[in-house]
Image (cartoon, rainbow, N blue to C red):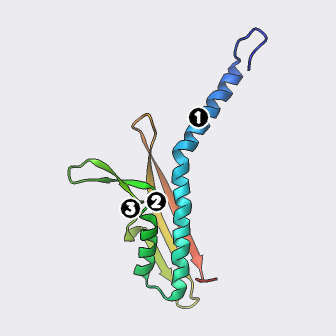
């Protein structure tokens, strides 16, 4: 990084800036992707419950309950202010469940998005997720 004269090279400075930027992005976005792995686990648990003849509403409740304590989401209150709430805030409309009477397979899809605030600015980036579990439950 240093020339024999003691000056810092441009390439070394650029490498350091890229390293700092990568660490920053990792710190900001890693929790969102870890929560997505937990959503995949919740969908898999609901898919396995389908083998026990659980109804669609029971499967949706399983997913909503398991994601209600992970992460956080933004909601607008009655005064039109953004409020940070615990949980992912999934709704029934975001969880699609399809069953095949012929093959016995069940397909569960969850579409949701997360808002990530890019600190120290007030800029917000939206990350969209699509989780799918398809197949015959219990196998």
- Mark whose residue sits in front, 3 or 2: 2
Distance CA(mark 1)–CA(mark 3) = 30 Å
Residue bearing mark 3: 89
Tell me: residue 114, above or below residue 27. Answer: below
Badge 1: residue crowd in 10 Å (few <14, some 14–19, many ≥20): few
Q: Residue furthest top?
A: 5
Q: Residue furthest right?
A: 4
Distance CA(mark 3)–CA(mark 2) = 10 Å
Q: Which mark is residue 70?
A: 2
Q: Quadrant of residue 5?
A: top right
Q: Quadrant of residue 125?
A: top left
Q: Which structural element holds mark 2?
A: loop
Q: Which structural element holds mark 3?
A: loop
Query: Dividing the image into 4 quarters, which one contains the C terminus?
Result: bottom right
Badge 2: residue crowd in 10 Å (few <14, some 14–19, many ≥20): some
Q: Earlier in the sequence, mark 1 or mark 2?
A: 1
State the residue at coordinates (74%, 16%).
Answer: 2
Q: Which structural element holds mark 1?
A: helix
Q: Which mark is residue 21?
A: 1
Q: Earlier in the sequence, mark 1 or mark 3?
A: 1
Tell me: residue 90, above or below residue 34. Answer: below
Horizontal arrangement in the rendering, residue 82 relative to residue 35 (left or right): left
State the residue at coordinates (39%, 37%).
Answer: 122
Residue 82 drawn at (x, y percent):
30, 48
Residue 54 drawn at (x, y percent):
46, 85
Decide which of 22, 129 is in the foreground and name it.
22
Horizontal arrangement in the rendering, residue 53 relative to residue 76 (left or right): right
Distance CA(mark 1)–CA(mark 2) = 26 Å
Q: Residue furthest front?
A: 69
């Amino acid at each position: 990084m240093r020339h024999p004269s003691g000056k810092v090279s441009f390439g070394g400075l650029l490498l350091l800036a890229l390293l700092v930027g990568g660490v920053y992005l990792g710190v900001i976005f890693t929790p969102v992707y870890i929560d997505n792995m937990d959503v995949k686990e919740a969908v898999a648990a609901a898919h396995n419950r389908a083998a026990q003849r659980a109804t669609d509403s029971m499967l949706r409740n399983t997913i909503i309950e398991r994601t209600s304590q992970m992460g956080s989401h933004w909601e607008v209150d009655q005064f039109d202010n953004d409020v940070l709430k615990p949980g992912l805030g999934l709704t029934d409309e975001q969880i699609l469940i399809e069953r095949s009477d012929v093959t016995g397979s069940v397909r569960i899809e969850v579409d949701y998005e997360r808002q990530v605030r890019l600190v120290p600015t007030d800029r917000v980036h939206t990350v969209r997720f699509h989780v799918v579990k398809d197949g015959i439950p219990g196998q």
